[in-house]
Image: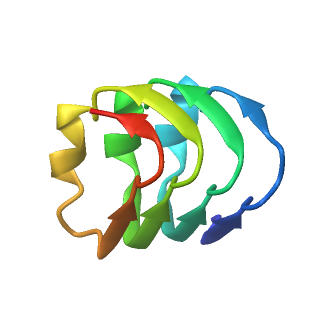
Amino acid sequence: DLWELYLQDNTFTGHLPLGIGNFIIMDHMDIFANKLSGELPASLSKLQMREYLNLSQNTFDGRIPEQLHHMLSLGTIDLSHNKLS
């Protein structure tokens, strides 16, 4: 199992893959301070996160998927410094 994923502060570009929700159980996912763009995939809500998800400081746009409210057990989700509505 993958418990932690730290991909912050790189120059990654493009979109988050639609299959990102296929990770089973993770504690931390940090993909902040990159140049990722596009809409957040609804599959994010399938992530069984325990601690936090940080996608801040990218250029994501569009609406925050309504499905993210299913991540109630998540301690923190940071989507700041994007172009989300």
Residue at 28% from the left image edge and 27% from the top image edge: 63
Please determine whether, in this image, residue 53 is positioned above or below residue 46. below
Residue at 50% from the left image edge and 33% from the top image edge: 60
Question: Furthest-right residue in view?
Answer: 11
* Image quadrant containing the N terminus: bottom right
The reply, left or right, for residue 47 in relation to residue 33 is left
Of residues 22 and 6, the one drawn nearer to the viewer in this rendering: 6
The reply, left or right, for residue 57 in relation to residue 44 is right
The reply, left or right, for residue 33 in relation to residue 53 is right
Of residues 72 and 22, the one drawn nearer to the viewer in this rendering: 72
Where residue 22 appears, x then y in whole percent? 51, 40
Of residues 13 and 21, the one drawn nearer to the viewer in this rendering: 13
Where on the picture, by quarter, is residue 8? bottom right
Of residues 31 and 59, the one drawn nearer to the viewer in this rendering: 59
Please determine whether, in this image, residue 44 is positioned above or below residue 81. above
Please determine whether, in this image, residue 45 is positioned above or below residue 19. below
Where on the picture, by quarter, is residue 7? bottom right
The reply, left or right, for residue 5 in relation to residue 10 is left
* Image quadrant containing the C terminus: top left
Give the total number of marks visible in the rendering. Answer: 0
Residue at 53% from the left image edge and 71% from the top image edge: 28
Where residue 76 appears, x then y in whole percent? 33, 71
**Colour mapping:** rainbow
Residue at 45% from the left image edge and 24% from the top image edge: 39
Where on the picture, by quarter, is residue 43? top left
Where residue 42 appears, x then y in whole percent? 34, 29
